[in-house]
Image (cartoon, helix red, strand yellow):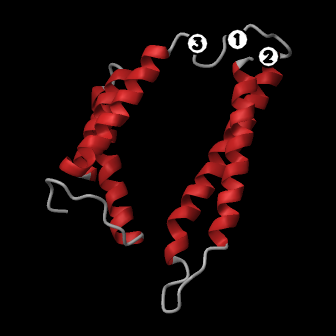
């Protein structure tokens, strides 16, 4: 199976799952006295993001198939990358372990810095800026917008 076909199937599956999640989100019961958007906000954001990513993947796969115009010289997705998949799996396990001890901001910054350094070699300044800014901004979104506080860990916020 070619990469574009795998991407197309993954995009369709993600879009369908996102649509089901979005439908289920709007059917969530809202207890009396609670902001109606409160329990629906985070699942709705995830469902919308899944729909958006799935749709984008479908469009890219279809565009790749059209531009290739029938040429089927692509390697299967993931062929030649088992080491990278293993590294990501181990990294996610370590992130999970570090999350409660170090907190969201610190563990996410370390996780991103390590992975960006590996997968985005040679762009040190960009990697550091992304690794530090992303968890800080996401923490602000969680605390201020969604009213949910991620693990604090070693930082006072």
Q: Residue at x 73, y 49 (%)?
A: 16
Picture quarter with the N terminus: top right
Q: Is residue 151 left or right of residue 22?
A: left
Q: Which mark is residue 79?
A: 3
The residue sitting at the right extreme is 70
Mark closer to the chain start, 2 or 3: 2
Q: Residue at x 66, y 66 (%)?
A: 24
Q: Is the C-beta separation of discs 2 and 1 under 8 Å?
A: yes
Describe residue 123's horizontal placement relative to residue 46 as left or right. Answer: left
Question: Percent x, y for residue 7?
Answer: 69, 29
| Contact, mark 1 vs mark 3 (Cβ under 8 Å) | no
Say if residue 126 shows up in the picture.
Answer: no
80 to 63, vertically: above or below = above
Q: What residue does disc 2 label?
A: 68
Which labelled disc corresponds to residue 74?
1
Q: Decide: few, some or many residues near mark 1? Use Cα within 10 Å; few <14, some 14-19, many ≥20.
A: few
- Measured in 3D between alpha carbons, the distance from the residue under mark 1 to the one under mark 3, in whole angstroms, is 10 Å
Nearest to N terminus: mark 2 or mark 1: 2
Distance in Å between CA atoms under marks 2 and 3: 19 Å
In-image side of 71 versus 75 (left or right): right
Q: Earlier in the sequence, mark 1 or mark 3?
A: 1
């Amino acid at each position: 199976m070619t990469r574009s076909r795998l991407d197309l199937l993954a995009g369709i599956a993600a879009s369908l799952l996102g649509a089901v999640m979005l439908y289920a989100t709007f059917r969530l019961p809202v207890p009396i006295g609670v902001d109606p958007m409160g329990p629906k906000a985070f699942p709705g954001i995830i469902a919308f993001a899944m729909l958006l990513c799935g749709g984008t993947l479908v469009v890219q796969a279809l565009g790749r198939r059209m531009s290739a115009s029938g040429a089927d010289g692509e390697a299967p997705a993931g062929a030649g990358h088992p080491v990278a998949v293993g590294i990501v799996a181990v990294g996610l396990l370590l992130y999970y372990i570090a999350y409660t001890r170090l907190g969201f901001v610190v563990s996410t910054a370390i996780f991103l810095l390590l992975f960006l350094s590996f997968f985005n070699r040679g762009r040190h300044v960009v990697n550091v800026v992304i690794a530090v800014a992303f968890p800080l901004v996401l923490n602000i979104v969680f605390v201020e917008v969604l009213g949910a506080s991620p693990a604090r860990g070693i930082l006072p916020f």
